[in-house]
Image: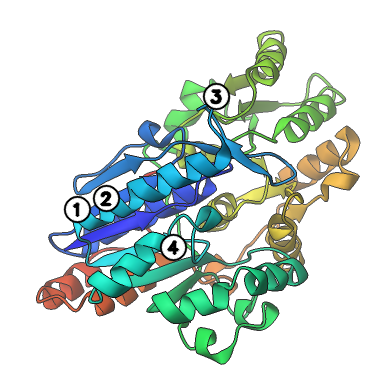
């Protein structure tokens, strides 16, 4: 069986990491599966690819803070870059002949670049199943409803899609109600739960030894995701850290992300070189090992990072992105109300507020003394696999069920 997985790729690493995690789990539980991942991410090559998964690299598109798209590296007009990407996707689908197409985030993809492919499948390959994957929160209801109406996304789901899978919980954020999905769309929506993440390849003891963390020292991990807009998060943390007594036993690891501008990385590297309690890394494909080893995580509030914080039961201070979409703030404030993390609105961020929040989390001895599963459903991977297997209806379905029963739902993701 063959799948094509389209990963939305204009900003950060979140969408790519989420789709890779899903791909790896599907390969574990569905026999004889081959997956072609389609992505324009500039760092897709940096991730470990398991047997059965390969990727098609599209020309990169970038999105500035205002949300405007442009060709990231090639000196061509944006519409020409979109046309090239659209043609590559369609050609890949025609030649690979997938049994199912899994589309991330937008029904027609970026700037409608998937429209020709969807129409081709509908006319020439009607047995190919098409599934939309939506994260728990898209944006504010006002903006999302307006966009979906203007771009006819509701009609797109009706015309081309067999199912829409939501990696979230209806009881936490009812996407169908908040975004006023018509009945003909809502009936295709299935809430799968959040995606559980495991601790990573290294044990906490090994990570702390590598970082030279003593037993009486606390480790704070600062990770702004891809890093393109992570400067203020890291800077405010470092300025706040400088206000603490030098005898305070805190070690800090900054993982800037590969998309943080080089000049900003160099600024933080210089600070780390002058302070032996601070260490710096640009990127790790095993981020979960460092999250597991940390006493507190300081991050933004992207979907993947929040899932990792929840799965690994970590104390966290999150400063969500609020532009160009409100998705991260809605998620962060919702999780904060449930007592799962500490959220700071970026408009209120300063070094004093940051370090006070970190200090409080370091000394919070009552953090989630009961199982996280009492609040958050983290079985999204297994439910996605069940829905996709049901659509495929292969003769290997019995073998799939056996594999699924013997595979824990919290497999380590590729990222």
For label 2, the residue is 92
Around disc 1, counting alpha carbons within 10 Å, would you say few (fewer than 14), some (14 to 19), or many (20 or more)? Answer: few
> SS at mark 1?
helix
> Which residue appears at 35% of the width and 61% of the height?
117
| For the residues bearing labels 2 and 1, Cβ distance under 8 angstroms | yes
Q: CA distance from mark 2 to mark 4?
A: 14 Å
Q: Find residue 198 and report its horizontal and vertical position in percent.
A: 42, 51
Quarter occupied by residue 260: top right
Question: For the residues marked 3 and 4, what is the alpha-carbon distance in whole angstroms?
Answer: 36 Å
Q: Is residue 395 left or right of residue 13?
A: left
Front one among 146 and 297: 146
Residue found at the very far left of the displayed protein: 395
On the question of residue 34 being in view, the answer is no
Instruction: Kindly identify which residue carries mark 3.
Output: 282
- N-terminal of the pair, mark 3 or mark 4, is 4
- Residue 227 in the figure: left or right of residue 198: right
Q: If the image is split into quadrants, where does the N terminus sit?
A: bottom left
Name which of mark 3 and mark 2 comes first in the sequence: 2
Secondary structure type for disc 3: loop
- Residue located beneath label 1 in the image: 95
The CA distance from mark 4 to mark 1 is 17 Å
Q: Earlier in the sequence, mark 3 or mark 1?
A: 1
Label 3, residues with CA under 10 Å away: few <14, some 14-19, many ≥20 = some
Which of the two residues, 204 or 114, is positioned nearer the viewer here? 114
Give the distance between the C-alpha atoms of the residues marked 3 and 1, in whole angstroms.
37 Å
Q: How many neighbours does mark 2 have within 10 angstroms: few (below 14), some (14-19), or many (20 or more)?
A: some
Which label's residue is closer to the chain start, 2 or 4?
2
Instruction: Say above or below: 364 vs 290.
Output: below
Q: Which mark is residue 115?
A: 4
Vertical placement of residue 65 versus 260, above or below: below
Q: Of discs 3 and 4, which sits in the foreground?
A: 4
């Amino acid at each position: 069986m063959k799948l094509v997985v389209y990963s939305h790729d204009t900003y950060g690493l979140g969408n790519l990491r989420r789709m890779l995690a899903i791909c790896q789990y599907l390969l574990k539980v569905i026999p004889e599966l081959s997956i072609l991942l389609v992505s324009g991410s500039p760092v897709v090559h940096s991730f470990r690819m398991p047997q059965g998964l390969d990727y098609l690299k599209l020309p990169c598109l970038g999105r500035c803070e205002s949300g405007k798209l442009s060709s990231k590296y090639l000196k061509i007009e944006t519409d020409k870059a979109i046309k090239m990407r659209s043609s590559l996707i369609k050609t890949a689908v025609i030649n690979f002949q997938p049994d199912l197409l899994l589309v991330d985030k937008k029904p027609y993809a970026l700037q409608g670049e998937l429209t020709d492919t969807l129409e081709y499948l509908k006319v020439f390959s009607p047995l190919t199943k098409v599934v939309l994957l939506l994260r728990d929160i898209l944006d504010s209801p006002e903006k999302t409803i307006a966009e979906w109406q203007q771009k006819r996304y509701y009609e797109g789901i009706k015309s081309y899609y067999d199912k829409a899978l939501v990696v979230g919980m209806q009881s936490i954020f009812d996407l169908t109600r908040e975004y006023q999905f018509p009945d003909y769309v809502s009936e295709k929506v299935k809430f799968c739960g959040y995606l559980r993440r495991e601790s990573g390849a290294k044990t906490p003891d090994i990570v702390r030894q590598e970082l030279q963390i003593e037993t009486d020292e606390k480790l704070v991990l600062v990770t702004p995701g891809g890093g393109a807009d992570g400067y203020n998060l890291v800077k405010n943390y470092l300025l706040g850290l400088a206000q603490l007594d030098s005898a305070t036993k805190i070690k800090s690891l900054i993982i800037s992300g590969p998309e943080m501008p080089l000049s900003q990385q160099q600024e933080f590297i210089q600070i780390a070189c002058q302070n032996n309690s601070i260490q710096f890394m640009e990127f790790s494909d095993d981020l979960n090992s460092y999250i597991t080893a940390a006493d507190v995580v300081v991050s933004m509030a992207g979907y993947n990072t929040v899932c990792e914080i929840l799965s690994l039961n970590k104390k966290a201070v999150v400063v969500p992105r609020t532009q160009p979409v409100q998705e991260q703030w809605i998620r962060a404030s919702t999780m904060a109300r449930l007592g799962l993390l500490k959220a700071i609105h970026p408009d209120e961020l300063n070094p004093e507020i940051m370090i006070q929040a970190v200090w409080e989390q370091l000394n919070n001895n009552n953090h989630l003394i009961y199982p996280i599963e009492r609040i958050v459903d983290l079985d999204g991977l297994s439910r996605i696999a069940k829905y996709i297997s049901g659509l495929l209806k292969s003769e290997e379905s019995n073998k799939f069920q056996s594999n699924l029963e013997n595979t824990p739902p919290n497999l380590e993701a590729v990222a």
